[in-house]
Amino acid sequence: MLEAMSEAMLEPLSKTVSEPAPPVAEAEDFSPPLRYPFLIGVYMATNAIPDAYTVVDGPDCLFFKTEYIHGKHDVRSTLLDVFGNHRIALTNVNAGNVAKSHGDAVLRKIKQIDALPGSSVIFVSSLPMVTIIGTQYDTLVRDAQPQTGARLIDCPGRSLQGDWLSGYSDMLISLAHNVDTSGGVLDPKKVAIVGHLMDRTEGDHVANVRELERIVAALGLELVTVWLGNQPYAQLSEIRDAATILAFPLGEKASKVIATRTGARVLDMKVPFGLSRTRRMIAELARATGTEAAADAFVEAELRELIPRMEWVVPHIFLGKKLGFSAAPDLLGGFVQIAQDLGAEVVHLSAPCFDNHLAEDLAEDCDAFPTPLFSPKMRAIRVEMERLAATGIDLLMCNTELRQMMSRLPSSRGARAPITLEFGFPSFFDHALADRPFLGFRGWIAFVDRMANALMAAREVVASEFPPHQ
């Protein structure tokens, strides 16, 4: 019976394809895109390594990008320091002195940071206006390394070509090229994960790491490190002993670099967002490590605990509901599967980044889905929000920017504003102080719990319009 219930949960109940209205033609729309810059990803990766610092060769205006993360998106961030020992350090070059810059300011910043207690790794990046003068940062870092106690790593600046996810991925690649792997001995029981997007260090992402550790441990294995998982540089270095590396989409290139250096086996994985993708990750890891029996027992126990909780909410809360989702591309397919498992219809998908970050064909796993919008122009996405509000959407999970846009739409007579929940980057007004994962089995139930409560709150609003007779 349990198997039948679990299979039923994984069978898509919605077959309707919903296409969004075509966005405004690019040539006609000169509004800025809904996309975040390269250095945001660099800062985000720095934030996710507690003893890391990053020196950026550029003007002081770059400092204010830290405020997208510290204290706004991540209330537990340590990027900024009350004594001025910030983990993002700038050389403060400007248009007047950039031509005279030969890396001296970078070396001074490196020395200042290296003198601080607890600085284990220092990344060096730059802005294109400085890079164009030809400073050889890789040579500078190589020559300075013997004089410092911290590990120095060059992360070439690609602000003109990449976006925030490019910056995050490039930091992983640079780390993979330079992390200390000396003395490593591959252990078949040790596993590493590369490509986890830890956009903040609050209870959602910290709990994601704990859930990944729990899943791997259930197979009799050890998850030695998560790139990135709010783990110090020394723990990131333990990847030297991992015989198996699970590569999430953002970490595929970095994983191959590490595997070349250590000889580890790389398993390309979709992010375990939802029941189906969590089960798939466990099955693939189990086959690769010979732990199928433990995996089967673990999955059965998890489903036996979780599936009965959905008996009432699926038909009464989710069935037939119209949902929208805007987040990083590696979560889009998982969300569609979650919605279809619950009997809901997905009517909007978007991501605030370039489309090259979508590393899968959604049609392979998803029964029906709208065409995702990548890096949409602000005018076009506003048109899309107006369409959703007009045609009807029950719940939209999105970042702060889209949530505020939706809330500011002029309300039509008699219509209720769509329910929105903050999710993804940036989330300025929703924070996870307690554990609230969204990956793995526990993440699935926590994520569904958030959506169910939002939809039930919407039902309360409807009920209040038709009060019972006194």
Image: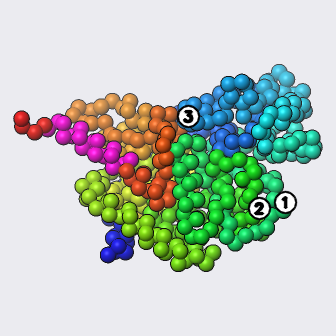
> What's drawn in magenta, residue-wise?
450-466
Tell me if residue 459 is in the magenta stretch. Answer: yes
Q: Position of residue 391 (x, y in %)?
A: 30, 45
Q: Is residue 7 shown above or below 445?
A: below
Amino acid under disc 2 = Arg
Query: Pointer 1: what residue?
Result: 182
- Quadrant of the drawing holding the N terminus: bottom left
Question: Is disc 1 in contact with disc 2, using a CB cutoff of under 8 Å?
Answer: yes
Query: Pointer 3: what residue?
Result: 75
Measured in 3D between alpha carbons, the distance from the residue under mark 2 to the one under mark 3, in whole angstroms, is 32 Å
Which residue occupies 69% across, 44% down? 49
Q: Main secondary structure of the magenta part?
A: helix
Question: Is disc 2 in contact with disc 3, using a CB cutoff of under 8 Å?
Answer: no
Tell me if residue 119 is in the magenta stretch. Answer: no
Which residue occupies 76% across, 31% down? 89
Q: How many marks?
A: 3
Query: Pointer 2: what residue?
Result: 240
Amino acid under disc 1 = Ser
For this orientation, the residue located farthest to the left is: 470
Question: Is disc 1 in contact with disc 3, using a CB cutoff of under 8 Å?
Answer: no
| Dot 1 crowding, Cα within 10 Å, few <14, some 14–19, many 20+ | few
Q: Which one is in front, 80 or 69?
A: 80
Which residue occupies 73% across, 41% down? 51
The picture quadrant where one finds residue 191 is: bottom right
Q: Position of residue 233 (x, y in %)?
A: 74, 48
Amino acid under disc 3 = Val
Secondary structure of the residue carrying numbered label 1: loop
Measured in 3D between alpha carbons, the distance from the residue under mark 1 to the one under mark 2, in whole angstroms, is 8 Å
